[in-house]
Amino acid sequence: MFIKKHRRFGGFRQQDANEFTACLLDQLSQEEAGRPPRPDVRSVVDRVFQGRQQTCVTCTACGTSYYTESLFTGLNVPVASSLPHDSERVTDQKVMDAIQTAKLPVHQDYESLHLCPSIEGCLARHTFPDVAQGFKCLYCTLMWYQAALTKKLSGELDESTKKEYQDHLVTVKEGLELVSEASASRRPLSDEDTEPYDTYFTRRPVRQAATVRVALVGPAAPQVLMIALTRFKQTGVKVVKNNDPVGFRETLDMAPFSIGGPAPRYRLRGVTIHSGGLGGGHYTAVCRAGATWTHYSDSSVRSGVKPDVQPYVLFYERIDEEKEDLDESPDLE
């Protein structure tokens, strides 16, 4: 049934395990929700794998922040590298200051963590502030209109035109208050919120440099956290694989990479491994049941192995702090 709906996974061509898992979970979620999907029904997949992530975009000119939240069933994070993050190559002092302000505490306390070859380093790079050029800032746009309308109203105008400009000025000021309030309270702006100002935003948007930072929403963390490393990258016309080593431990604390409240700790339950290259590779897995790790490679099954591997996808289970498992084994180095 799955292959009939996702024919690209049929046959003997090399496929991506992370993409396959994402499609499978999505299919299972749709099947349980029914057709058409009911918005009031959360499937087992959603309840187990679904988390929430916040994106904060901050204009470097006016300092206004815009927040959005999105759901995910798995995180795709870059492989930590000894090379600086792209945003660290910025030379404009104003933008550099904005990047420093946008950083999570973990980036300020451990400035080189995103350079470390570990799963924590990968998460630090994933949440490290980036820089976007040409960002359309609603607050800067409305400020420009406020200045332009105020200047026009200071001149000689007929009553009809004056009334029209005054009405526009009232709308613009209301928009400035709305955007300021949403930024201060970290509240996402909806399409309904911004609809009255679409005309100004479409006609003459003011573009600025902006910082972009993502973080997990701690209280909305999933029961099972799936982390995929972006080991495959398009370079020109070629796709290359990143084989850089990434270390991981059995427990993972997501608090440093989260906002909005307490974030859980996780315990590793399984790892998907990809060996070989793009032309011909092989997927294996190492899974934990109780205190025993088992390696699976097609029909070959070996128990009692240490998951000393190069991970591609890692599966972590949320730790119940009030009732921790008694089968906890030492951290993996």
Image: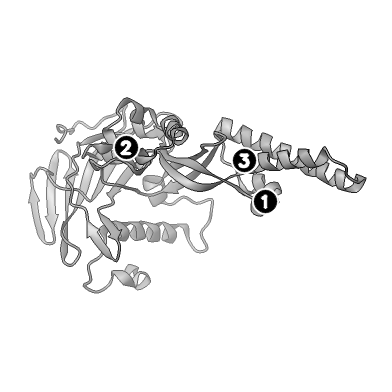
- Which secondary structure, mark 1? helix
- Does residue 55 show up? no
Residue drawn 43% across and 39% down?
A: 213
The residue to which callout 3 is attached is 140
- The Cα atoms of the two marked residues, 2 and 3, are separated by 30 Å
The residue to which callout 2 is attached is 124
Q: Quadrant of the N terminus?
A: bottom left
Where residue 217 appears, as percent x and y from the top left, is 43, 37
Q: Amino acid at mark 2?
A: Ala
Q: Is residue 289 above or below residue 243?
A: above
- The Cα atoms of the two marked residues, 1 and 2, are separated by 36 Å
Where residue 274 appears, as percent x and y from the top left, is 18, 56
Q: Amino acid at mark 1?
A: Asp
Q: Amino acid at mark 3?
A: Cys
The residue to which callout 1 is attached is 198
Q: Is residue 88 above or below residue 35?
A: above
Please identify the quarter of the rendering in which residue 91 is found: top left
Where residue 53 appears, as percent x and y from the top left, is 43, 42
Where residue 105 appears, as percent x and y from the top left, is 38, 27
- The Cα atoms of the two marked residues, 3 and 1, are separated by 14 Å
Q: Are marks 3 and 1 in contact (CB under 8 Å)?
A: no
Please identify the quarter of the rendering in which residue 2 is found: bottom left
Residue drawn 67% across and 37% down?
A: 176
User: Mark 1 or mark 2, which has the lower sequence index?
Assistant: 2
Please identify the quarter of the rendering in which residue 139 is found: top right
User: Mark 2 or mark 3, which has the lower sequence index?
Assistant: 2
Q: Which mark is residue 261?
A: none
Q: Nearer the viewer, residue 47 or 115?
A: 115
User: Mark 3 or mark 1, which has the lower sequence index?
Assistant: 3
For this orientation, the residue located farthest to the right is 159
Q: Nearer the viewer, residue 163 or 317?
A: 163
